[in-house]
Image: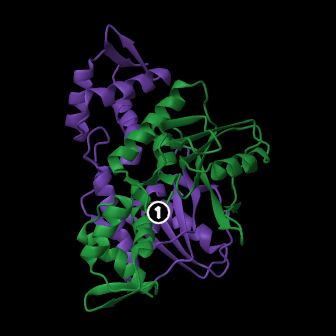
Chain colours: A purple, B green
Amino acid sequence: MDPKCFSCQLVSWDEAYGLARKLAYKIKSSDFRPDLVIAIGRGGYVPARVVCDFLLHSLLTSIKIEHWDIAASKRQEVTVRFPLAADVHNQRILIIDDVTDTGDTLRAAVGYIKGLGCREIKTGVLQHKITSSFEPDFCADVIREWRWIIYPWAAHEDLVGFTEKILSEELCSSVDIRDRLREQYGLVVDEEGLKEVLEDLIVMGKAERQDGKYRKI
Amino acid sequence: MDPKCFSCQLVSWDEAYGLARKLAYKIKSSDFRPDLVIAIGRGGYVPARVVCDFLLHSLLTSIKIEHWDIAASKRQEVTVRFPLAADVHNQRILIIDDVTDTGDTLRAAVGYIKGLGCREIKTGVLQHKITSSFEPDFCADVIREWRWIIYPWAAHEDLVGFTEKILSEELCSSVDIRDRLREQYGLVVDEEGLKEVLEDLIVMGKAERQDGKYRKI
């Protein structure tokens, strides 16, 4: 896969809600009833909240898993940044995330929670990519052809990342940038959204504006 | 206010996103830059995730605040059910919730986090009701005329609650129930959504079906 050119899918709020609702029904149709639901931060926050709504489940908490590049390696280290603040001893645990991509996040989360002495763990995601080496117990949708999924709660950050990749040392107009986002990633971005993204890149010291055009610095 | 008849507002996903985005811009326009964002569980999960997106902020965690009725009193006790699992010493903290209604939740959260030794705390909500005795630092919208706000991530639970209130000991059809929800709470519910709600009430042992009609038990 050329990292400068791959397919993205922008998920709308209504689509994401539909997926979370479908995930909740799959869990509800099983015989698994969690004592505690754990959202993986940050991607699992919205799906976990919606799943709790349909399960009429009040006990929701979170952990944060982080990924770090390992120097001189393509692999990443996965660590628990914010641990669990609940007693899981003898409890049935449901862990929720947005997507399984490599599967490293859910594998790390399950290993960590298992070590805390719970009775049973199940995992659920909105979308499971078959490229993932970890298979969740529940998923609303299976993605067979790899693409980058942009969920609505991460759309701004993802767009900042893609726009940063697209900027070059030559000045280019916002129209050029929008064309490149569409050609290289299949992303259709409105003028207003792109303006906010470019302003953030300037504040972050990653881009500069000159004569109404932009380049990376 | 007659507890059997009051106004509700059902917020769509796009409206909720618009509010969260507006909240994020108010924070961004201030000189406050949080080191850590804390979502109040469960209502603050979605707003906090979206605020982090627009602030390009990675460090998000949660606490859970619970309300308990105090016997023989109209007051409620507010307790921290799941504590903070992060070190806040000398940190700038942003606490996010969905709405300030009485204000008890945010007041309890601020008191709790302050006691952990942070440097500064700011609070933000999507909607601030002027009935609240706690005023947040940031809010996207001010509600001057009290109404119950149904956010999309809590719509099923809220509807279960309202339908339970509406059921009587006499059998009534789903059409009757939908009429009552509209008349008493201004809620327009589709047939499919109400069916799921009634099924949940039956499973919970709070309703029974007889000849295609429903009554409370």
In the picture shown, does residue A181 fall above or below A172?
below
| Residue A91 on image: x %, y % | 61, 79
Q: Nearer the viewer, residue A131 or A112?
A: A112
The answer to whether residue A160 is visible is yes
The quadrant holding residue B74 is bottom right
**Residue at the farthest bottom position:** B211
- Residue A150 location, x and y as percent? 34, 47
Tag 1, which secondary structure?
A: helix
Q: Residue at x 52, y 25 (%)?
A: B29
The x, y position of residue B110, in whole percent, is: 70, 46
Looking at the image, residue A215 lies above or below residue A58: above
Q: Which residue is outermost to the front?
A: B2
Rendered image quadrant of residue A65: bottom right
Give me the chain letter of mark 1: A
Classify the position of the C terminus of chain B by image quarter. Answer: bottom left
Vertical placement of residue B217 versus A122, above or below? below
**Residue A131 seen in the current view:** no
Type of amino acid under label 1: Ala
| Residue with the most extreme top position | A211
Is residue B9 rendered to the left or right of residue A78? left
Query: Closer to the camera, B80 or B51?
Result: B80
Q: Nearer the viewer, residue A174 or B104?
A: B104
Q: Is residue B1 left or right of residue A15?
A: right
Judging by the rendered image, the residue that carries numbered circle 1 is A48
Left or right: residue A119 versus residue A135 is: right
Residue A129, picture quadrant = bottom left
- Give percent across and percent down for residue B9: 39, 52
Residue neighbourhood size for the residue with mark 1, other residues' Cα within 10 Å, grouped as few (<14), some (14–19), many (≥20): many
Count of labels in the image: 1
Residue drawn at (56%, 41%) of the image: B130
